[in-house]
Image: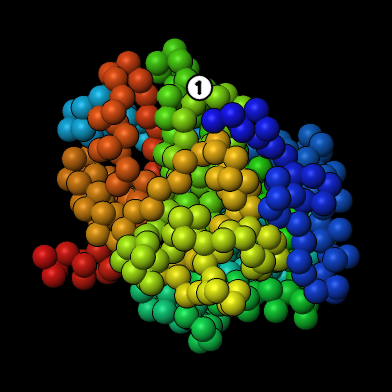
Amino acid sequence: MTALPLIQTEPTEEGYFGDFGGRFVPETLISALDQLEYEYGLLEQDLVFQEQLLSEFRQFIGRPTPLTFAKRLTETYGGAKIYLKREDLCHTGAHKINNAIGQVMLAQKMGKQNIVAETGAGQHGVATATACAKLGLTCIVYMGEEDVHRQKLNVERMRLMGAEVIPVTSGSRTLKDATSEAIRHWVTHVRDTFYVIGSVVGPHPYPKMVRDFHRCIGLETREQLDQLEGKGPDHLIACVGGGSNALGLFHPFLEDLSVYMTGAEAAGFGVDSGKTAATLTKGRPGVLHGSLSYLLQTMDGQVELAHSISAGLDYPGIGPEHAHLFTSGRVTYKAVTDDEAMKALKEVSMLEGIIPAIETAHAFALLPEIASSMNKDQIIVVNCSGRGDKDMTTITEYFSHE
């Protein structure tokens, strides 16, 4: 752990966290990214905008979200007290709305009336469509054809709010390909269109900006635990695909070296199965969707297809700040298989009366090992990043084979 003092919590001027990040985009997007960085920098210091954003968080999203003591999980696993940060109770059912409302408000300030987004599990698409409906902007969402089928409920929610959902039929027909198509759309409509990225990925300043809109998760957790327990957490756990919900929880605690943090990435059928999304476990550095980070790739540098039972974790890359936290050793990342996640989903549902999203279930799968290794005076917080309504078709099909 000697590398811990070298942790970098903000990007360089060029957009790098350690060795990861930057901008790897067509020349036509450079001026748009420069403008975005400038405008976002202004709004970071704009007290009127920040108060408007906080008002939307309180009155529209429903923040602060509760911190729920998981009594039966704590009793079952033994060891540490387990608390759940309830992002599943946000309007639209997941943490994604924090970032969507922030970016769409920023787009409106910049005079951009057209929004384009990508989505995997559909939660970011739903959140973006929601924000656009509220603020009166047009919305196009690219979604992999495979995800359109397994997330039909979210597709209908987006369309009901006026968004145009465009199925993507290329490649794996999942999140990677939806992101690629959204970027192509942005390149050809850059003058009047704002690209709302759904995770801490993409070219600078998106990884920082998306993370900042989610920092409320960790900031609220610190304040709520202080009120409930008179102390902070000892261990934080969150699932990691692109990694926005995890950084939202982790970031306010990164400089507190007494707080351990673990990210759960999707192992799919197993990290050595050839059907996995365990980017940090199996990947290596490379460029995808505008930034340098870890990604799953073949020996000759071609991006490999990712697999996860979770549409939201089915992505071959990861945010550059996570790559930095991984290589520095500040955060531990563990791979969780489909079966392990689904077992945890059923257990949490039966013990706590909370059906988590399949993405979130990957984080819950780490609880038995981590909680039992800690003492009863210690505290774990799991980020319950989304609810499982959207996944009921997949959940029902999976357990029908038991």
| Placement of the N terminus among the 4 image quadrants | top right
| Callout 1 crowding tier (Cα within 10 Å): few <14, some 14–19, many ≥20 | few
**Relative horizontal placement of residue 391, taking residue 238 as reference (left or right):** left
Residue 92 appears in view: no
Coordinates of residue 147 in the picture (x, y in percent): 43, 74
- 126 w.r.t. 189: above or below: above
Residue denoted by label 1: 258
- 84 w.r.t. 151: above or below: above
* Furthest residue toward bottom: 169
Tally of marks: 1
**Relative horizontal placement of residue 265, taking residue 398 as reference (left or right):** right
| Placement of the C terminus among the 4 image quadrants | bottom left
* Furthest residue toward top: 230
Coordinates of residue 119 in the picture (x, y in percent): 53, 68
Q: Which of 124 and 91 is in front in this view?
A: 124
**Residue appearing at x 73%, y 74% in the figure:** 186
* Furthest residue toward left: 402
**Relative horizontal placement of residue 113, taking residue 265 as reference (left or right):** right
Coordinates of residue 290 in the picture (x, y in percent): 71, 66
Q: Could you tell me the amino acid type at mark 1?
A: Ser
Residue 33 appears in view: yes
Coordinates of residue 397 in the picture (x, y in percent): 21, 70
**Residue appearing at x 58%, y 45% in the figure:** 327
**Residue appearing at x 40%, y 16% in the figure:** 229
Element under disc 1: loop
Residue 194 sits in which quadrant?
bottom right
Color style of the picture: rainbow
**Residue appearing at x 72%, y 70% in the figure:** 114
